[in-house]
């Protein structure tokens, strides 16, 4: 599930958990999980303390991990697949265990030994596809910085320091939440269209990952807002400049090039991008647009579809695979868990067979189709979504150009 890269380790103090996640030392390892995780549910990543393996390598070294489920409170015997050797010597093993009478899926990753030690981590989550849909993005964010987990663990070691760090982190997370509330205002009270020069659709291609796309808000005064994720007319730029200065940038055109300079940069840098286009008030769209995401080494992939109809109706559908399933084409390994959703409802499927007491796979259907169908209404840089279950959202929306070959919805790009 995580990108097990061997990039140079960054300073430990630079590491922060994804927004909305907590991080603390537990069982001598680094535990990260969503702050608003429902009671009784499990969705966590635990980076274990480094383990001495002597001269052992590969599967022999993996066999030295004698208690991979520590801290989970499991009962019975786990149902496990044999360990698999993945790209760059990473080893992974998928299991289903029982915690408080409920099935929990786990995956243990081990990096190749270095200097007689191995770094390994465990991902665990309840068999509930709604959790994967809600919190999968957090795991995706962690995967891009997995090299920093063990330096962060070392930095947090020690009881006194752990308590100080936990308290400070909690306060910092609350400050971030307060900033998010402060910079968002009612529709029409934020940035006016007359002050917008461009909304720039940008992209870059990380190694081993799918293309990353963002919208940057470029204002006529030469400043802008990085990684726009809300309709501009709901963004209070005065509050942003005061409370979120790291998201404020400068921009300019150099010939055909787009250049930006972030708050911590002294030189201009060129980025790839094209101006996005807003929708006309009441405009309708026809066709299916798809957002795809994958991580080669992490073994995860997803496709989310948004089907627009010319009569103002929409339907969402998609499928996600978490675990070694994302590497099936390369390694022939089935994914640990999959989720799918459409107008027929949502379904989650475990890839680990029920071969041991208290553990197993299977399918469950938990959400109805009204969560994924409804009506939409476009107005400039916003889309109002009225779902058939009664929920209503107003999210960021943009076209990639006059041809409408792609759209940007909330925080992701979708293409035909």
Image (spheres, rainbow, N blue to C red):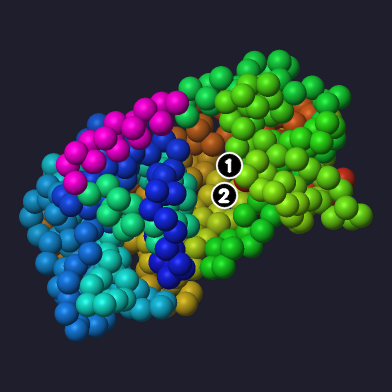
Image position of 297 (left or right of 315): left
Mark 2 crowd level (few <14, some 14–19, many ≥20, 10 Å Cα): some
* Position above or below: 10 against 113: above
Q: Is residue 385 at least partly visible in the picture?
A: no
Q: Nearer the viewer, residue 198 or 397?
A: 198
Image position of 416 (left or right of 221): left
* Position above or below: 301 against 329: above
Residue tagged 2: 304
Q: Tell me the SS state at disc 2.
A: strand
The number of numbered badges drawn on the structure is 2
Secondary structure predominantly adopted by residues drawn in magenta: helix
* Residue in the image at 8% along x and 51% along y: 75
Q: Are marks 2 and 1 in contact (CB under 8 Å)?
A: yes
Image coordinates of residue 286 in percent, x first then y, are 76, 42
Q: Tell me the SS state at disc 1.
A: strand
Q: Which mark is residue 316?
A: 1
Q: Nearer the viewer, residue 182 or 116?
A: 116
Q: Is residue 137 at least partly visible in the picture?
A: yes
Q: Nearer the viewer, residue 234 or 353?
A: 234
Decide whether residue 98 is among the magenta residues.
no
Image position of 316 (left or right of 19): right
Mark 1 crowd level (few <14, some 14–19, many ≥20, 10 Å Cα): many
| Residue range of the region highlighted in magenta in the rendering | 158-175
Q: Earlier in the sequence, mark 2 or mark 1?
A: 2
């Amino acid at each position: 599930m995580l990108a097990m890269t061997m990039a140079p380790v960054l300073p430990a103090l630079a590491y922060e958990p994804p927004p909305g996640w907590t991080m603390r030392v537990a069982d001598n390892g680094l535990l990260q999980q969503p702050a608003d995780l429902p009671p009784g549910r499990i969705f966590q990543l635990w980076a274990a303390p480094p383990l001495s393996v002597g001269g052992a390598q590969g599967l022999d070294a993996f066999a030295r991990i004698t208690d991979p489920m520590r801290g989970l409170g499991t009962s019975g015997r786990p149902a496990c697949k044999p360990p698999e050797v993945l790209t760059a010597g990473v080893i992974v093993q998928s299991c289903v265990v029982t915690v408080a009478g409920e099935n929990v899926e786990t995956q243990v990753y081990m990096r190749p030994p270095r200097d007689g030690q191995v770094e390994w981590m465990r991902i665990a989550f309840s068999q509930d596809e709604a959790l994967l849909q809600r919190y999968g993005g957090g795991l995706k964010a962690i995967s891009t910085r997995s090299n920093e987990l063990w330096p962060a663990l070392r930095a947090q070691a020690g009881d006194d320091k752990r308590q100080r760090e936990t308290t400070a982190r909690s306060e910092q997370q609350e400050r971030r939440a307060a900033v998010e509330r402060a910079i968002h205002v009612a529709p029409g009270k934020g940035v006016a269209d007359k002050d917008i020069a461009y909304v720039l659709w940008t992209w870059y291609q990380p190694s081993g990952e799918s293309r990353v796309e963002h919208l940057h808000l470029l204002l006529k005064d030469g400043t802008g807002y990085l990684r726009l994720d809300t309709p501009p007319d709901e963004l209070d730029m005065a509050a942003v400049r005061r409370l979120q200065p790291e998201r404020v940038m400068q921009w300019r055109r150099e010939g055909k090039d787009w250049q930006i300079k972030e708050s911590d940069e002294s030189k201009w840098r060129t980025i790839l991008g094209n101006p996005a286009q807003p929708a006309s008030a009441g405009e309708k769209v026809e066709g299916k647009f798809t957002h795809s995401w994958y991580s080669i080494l992490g073994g995860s992939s997803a496709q989310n579809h948004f089907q627009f109809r010319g009569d103002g109706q929409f339907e969402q559908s998609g499928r996600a695979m978490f675990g070694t399933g994302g590497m099936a084409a390369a390694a022939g390994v089935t994914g640990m868990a999959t989720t799918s959703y459409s107008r027929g409802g949502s379904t989650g499927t475990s890839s680990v067979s029920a071969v041991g007491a208290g553990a197993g796979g299977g399918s469950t259907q938990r959400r109805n189709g009204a969560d994924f169908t409804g009506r939409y209404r476009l107005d400039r840089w916003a889309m109002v979504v009225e779902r058939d279950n009664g929920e209503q959202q107003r999210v960021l929306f943009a076209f990639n150009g006059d041809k409408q070959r792609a759209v940007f919805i909330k925080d992701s790009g979708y293409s035909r």
